Image (spheres, rainbow, N blue to C red):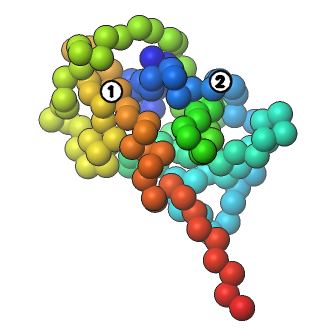
């Protein structure tokens, strides 16, 4: 698992989805996109969209800082960056130790939940996030 922080809460993703972690640099905003799409970044010639999970999950926003990290994830034919406030580290975690949910996790976060540890680490189901049609921005040209 790759453990990270969002709005003072601890989250994790299975490391099989994570390509790399890097600092957020040179973000180019994209007009006419949902609020959780911050923009795009160029990572060694690859142009990737950046999603703000805090906005997607309706968590409190603290503004962009130099400490923000980008978690580059890939699933099937979709590659993107997820914004994290801080990277805690990598750890092993048996999947059978996860509880289903906490009463404080409601709304959209619970839809993308794989489980919660006894120490309140929220493990996200990245397959569900990547499969959500809301994260695909369709560009339509009307002639």
Residue at the spot 69% in from the left edge and 25% down from the top edge: 22
Q: Nearer the viewer, residue 102 or 113?
A: 113
The first of marks 2 and 1 along the sequence is 2
Q: Residue at x 62, y 32 (%)?
A: 72
Q: Residue at left 43%, top 44%?
A: 129
Left or right, residue 52 beside residue 124: right
Q: Camera-side residue: 35 or 12?
A: 12
What residue is pinned by disc 1? 122
| Secondary element at image label 1 | strand
Q: Mark yes or no: residue 64 visible.
A: no
Taking 139 as reference, is 128 above or below it? above
- Residue under circle 2? 20
Give residue 58's mark: none
> Can the viewer see residue 41?
yes
Residue sitting farthest toward the bottom: 143
Disc 2 or disc 1, which is closer to the eye?
2
Quadrant that contains the N terminus: top left
**Disc 1: CA contacts within 10 A as few (<14), some (14-19) or many (>=20):** many
- Residue 131 locus on image (x, y percent): 44, 49
Q: Position of residue 143 (x, y in %)?
A: 72, 91
Vertical comparison of 136 with 125: above or below: below
């Amino acid at each position: 698992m790759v453990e990270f922080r969002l709005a003072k809460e601890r989250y994790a993703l299975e490391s099989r989805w994570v390509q790399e972690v890097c600092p957020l640099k040179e973000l180019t905003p994209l007009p006419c996109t949902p609020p959780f799409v911050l923009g795009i970044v160029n990572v060694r010639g690859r142009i990737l969209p950046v999603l703000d999970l805090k906005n997607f999950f309706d968590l409190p926003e603290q503004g962009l800082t130099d400490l923000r990290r980008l978690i580059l994830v890939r699933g099937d034919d979709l590659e993107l960056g997820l914004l994290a406030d801080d990277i805690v580290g990598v750890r092993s975690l048996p999947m059978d130790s996860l509880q289903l949910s906490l009463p404080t996790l409601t709304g959209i976060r619970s839809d993308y939940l794989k489980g919660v540890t006894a120490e309140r680490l929220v493990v996200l189901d990245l397959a569900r996030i990547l499969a959500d049609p809301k994260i695909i921005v369709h560009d339509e040209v009307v002639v």
